[in-house]
Image (tube, rainbow, N blue to C red):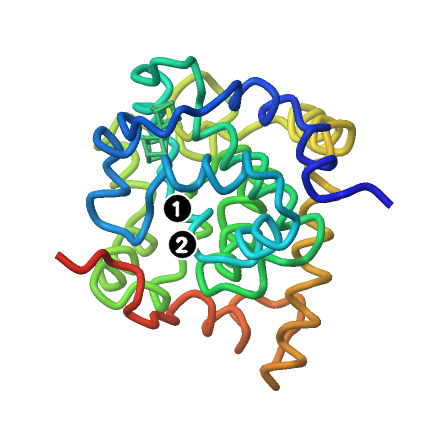
Amino acid sequence: MSTLYGMLLTDVRFVEGLNACMNCGVCTAICPAAEFYNYDPRKLLNQVQLKDESIIEELLKSETIWYCGQCMSCKTRCPRGNTPAFVVQALRKLSVKLGFFVESEKGRQQFAIKRTVGENILKYGYCVHPEAVAPSMHPEQGPVWQWVHENAPSVMERLGASYQKQEAGTLRKIAIEDLDELQSIFDVTGGTEMFETIEKYSAQQAEKMKLEFNDQTPNEYFFNVYTEDNHNHQRNL
Ligand code: SF4
Ligand code: SF4
């Protein structure tokens, strides 16, 4: 069986992202996530390049790998040409593949992202779409969304959007053949498999946590991962 480090090496982003880290800390100095979270890209790269299986497994189960905002500032500054953000991408992918993501609060949120942004892409062709916004899920903005839903035709007309129309313009209806093509892209690139893996391990985690889990969004487990906050993510200043 391949080692965790061996599996990381099969990811082109890992190979591209980690040449040799000399622990200078420039990436951490520029990293906006390190400013707020218990997160340090210098430390993360150092941990990975130790090739220690237990340290890598710990990382795959940790909150740490989910803090990076993928702004790519580290890519532009590293004197060794490393890209910590690519290493993070590879760690995240492996964490999902092996089901380790459900061990952390931020990791479990992958389920909420899959059920919202992920499914919106395949259903509407947009990450965020007015039809998919449930006012009840947004305590502050909810009433505004409710009003937008009730007045959608006039609101969209005033915004100059081609909402739900099959013509050029913002928020136009995406043709079914284009949505089918998107689905095919997900199928051949591993996106569909990744979604299925997120569902599988999340269902198992819901059972462990004794929370309701089904095809409906939201369900009890969805609400839990969507709202859970252990308040241990921010850096102590
Ligand atoms: S800037 Fe580059 S060499 Fe320096 S700690 Fe970060 S990844 Fe390592
Ligand atoms: S991409 Fe991630 S690790 Fe790099 S600077 Fe941005 S937040 Fe930090």
Q: Quadrant of ligand 1?
A: top left
Query: Pointer 1: what residue?
Result: 130
Other-residue count near label 2 (Cα within 10 Å), few / some / many at <14 / 14–19 / ≥20: some
In the rendered image, the residue lying farthest to the right is: 1
In the rendered image, the residue lying farthest to the left is: 237
Describe the element under mark 2 as helix, strand or loop.
Answer: loop
Would you say 16 lies left or right of 228 here? Answer: right
Q: Dots 2 and 1: beta carbons under 8 Å?
A: yes
In percent of width and height, residue 128 lies at: 42, 41
As measured in the structure, the alpha-carbon distance from the residue carrying label 2 to the one carrying label 1 is 5 Å
Query: Could you tell me which quadrant the C terminus lies in?
Result: bottom left
Question: Which residue is at 63% across, 58% downward?
Answer: 100
Looking at the rendered structure, which numbered label has been put on residue 72? none
Question: Which residue is at 64% across, 72% downward?
Answer: 205
Above or below, comparing residue 137 to residue 90 in the picture: below
Question: Which residue is at 68% across, 38% downward?
Answer: 5
Looking at the rendered structure, which numbered label has been put on residue 133? 2
Above or below, comparing residue 198 to residue 160 in the picture: below
Would you say 89 lies left or right of 2 here? Answer: left
Amino acid type, residue under disc 2 in the picture: Val
Counting every numbered tag in the picture gives: 2
Amino acid type, residue under disc 1 in the picture: Pro
Query: Could you tell me which quadrant the N terminus lies in?
Result: top right
Above or below, comparing residue 52 to residue 112 in the picture: above
Question: Which residue is at 66% across, 49% downward?
Answer: 53
In percent of width and height, residue 37 lies at: 27, 51
